[in-house]
């Protein structure tokens, strides 16, 4: 994501000392460092006080080696995702044309837009669609300036939504990932053959990590099941995808071993706690529920771009 922007601002060379991933969140900044030569990965966390993520980020960047390949992950508050029909123009012209396509769909000024996109599958007989991610240029420039100040090797800027598919090995069938982070709407994604097929935010469940089991059973959990079932019905009836055969659950903010049994009791026997694919077994010593975006980005750092 935002790879075209980084073509103009990348300052480093290929790393020989490992990978660093810095994830900005609303309440904290996380830093995952994965040294080279098989050394164990580690995670540091710095709280964000009074919204001052810049100060927390500066403190974390000071702990990154200049020879590490650095990835930044920005939170949903720093970008918007817009779905629209894919314009029938040449690929090389698309990014230039997209700001004019979405200018009435976002509150970001035209001259402040930085964007990228991924293709989405279209329903049979329907036009192709894309997900466009748009961010504010001046805000990204502030991020890059902090990195440049420390002369670090910035490689990529990523978003949370386009990382989940990196965590699990997916078979040919459609798999659903349900992800919750504190104070964010639950993110539901359907993935097939490692590719994102469908994504939506489920509103009203930002406190999923805080509800007691009795509170969940007073209507919250039934509403969540209803939204999941609606999404599963939609991908079968409208997108013509095969039925969802596995559901992978990630719940950050608190240990919730009660959630999977609740799903099973409600007839959703395909729900399981998310298990990392074999290539990411180095991360099992970390708290996957809390640090999954950084783990996904680190696992992908030596492969193809996420988007």
Image: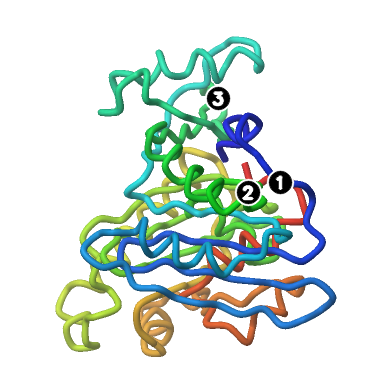
State the CA–CA distance, disc 1 to disc 3: 36 Å
**Residue occupying image coordinates x 52% and y 74%:** 270
State yes or no: discs 3 and 2 in contact (Cβ < 8 Å). Answer: no
State yes or no: discs 1 and 2 in contact (Cβ < 8 Å). Answer: yes
Which residue is nearer to you in this view: 63 or 31?
A: 63
The N terminus lies in quadrant: top right
Estimate how packed mark 1 is, as few (under 14), some (14 to 19) or many (20 or more) residues with alpha carbons within 10 Å.
some
**Residue occupying image coordinates x 21% and y 87%:** 212
User: Which of the two marks, 3 or 2, is nearer to us in this view?
Assistant: 2
Q: Quadrant of residue 165?
A: bottom right
Task: Reply above or below: 207 against 139.
Answer: below
Q: How is the image coloured?
A: rainbow
Where residue 280 appears, as percent x and y from the top left, is 71, 73
Q: Which residue is mark 1?
A: 12
Q: Secondary structure at mark 1?
A: loop
Where residue 278 appears, as percent x and y from the top left, is 75, 75
Estimate how packed mark 2 is, as few (under 14), some (14 to 19) or many (20 or more) residues with alpha carbons within 10 Å.
many
Task: Reply above or below: 44 against 196.
Answer: below
N-terminal of the two: label 1 or label 3? 1
Q: Which residue is mark 3?
A: 128
Q: Which residue is mark 2?
A: 154
Estimate how packed mark 3 is, as few (under 14), some (14 to 19) or many (20 or more) residues with alpha carbons within 10 Å.
some
Task: Reply above or below: 36 against 261.
Answer: above
Which residue is nearer to you in this view: 280 or 29?
A: 29
């Amino acid at each position: 994501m935002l790879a075209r922007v980084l073509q103009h601002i990348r300052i480093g060379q290929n790393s020989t000392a490992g990978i660093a991933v810095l994830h900005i969140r609303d309440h904290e900044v996380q830093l995952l460092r994965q040294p080279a030569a098989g050394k164990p990965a580690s995670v540091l966390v710095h709280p964000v006080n009074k919204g001052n993520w810049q100060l927390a980020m500066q403190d974390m960047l000071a702990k990154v080696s200049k020879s590490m390949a650095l990835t930044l992950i920005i939170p949903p508050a720093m970008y918007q995702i817009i779905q629209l029909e894919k314009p029938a123009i040449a690929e090389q012209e698309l990014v230039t044309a997209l700001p004019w396509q979405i200018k009435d769909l976002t509150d970001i000024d035209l001259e402040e837009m930085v964007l990228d996109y991924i293709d989405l599958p279209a329903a049979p007989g329907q036009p192709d669609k894309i997900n466009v991610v748009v961010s504010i240029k001046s805000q990204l420039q502030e991020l890059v300036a902090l990195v440049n100040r420390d002369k670090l090797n910035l490689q990529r800027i990523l978003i949370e939504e386009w990382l989940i598919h990196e965590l699990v090995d997916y078979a040919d069938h459609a798999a659903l990932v349900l992800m919750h982070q504190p104070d964010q709407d639950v993110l539901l994604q359907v993935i097939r053959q490692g590719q994102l097929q469908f994504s939506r935010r489920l509103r009203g469940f930002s406190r999923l990590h805080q509800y007691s089991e009795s509170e969940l059973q007073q209507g919250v959990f039934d509403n969540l099941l209803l939204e999941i079932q609606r999404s599963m019905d939609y991908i079968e009836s409208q997108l013509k995808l095969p039925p969802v055969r596995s559901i992978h659950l990630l719940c950050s903010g608190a240990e919730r071993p009660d959630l999977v049994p609740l799903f099973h009791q409600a007839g959703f026997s395909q729900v399981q706690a998310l298990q990392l694919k074999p290539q990411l077994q180095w991360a099992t010593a970390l708290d996957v529920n809390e640090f999954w975006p950084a783990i996904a980005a680190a696992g992908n750092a030596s492969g193809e771009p996420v988007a």
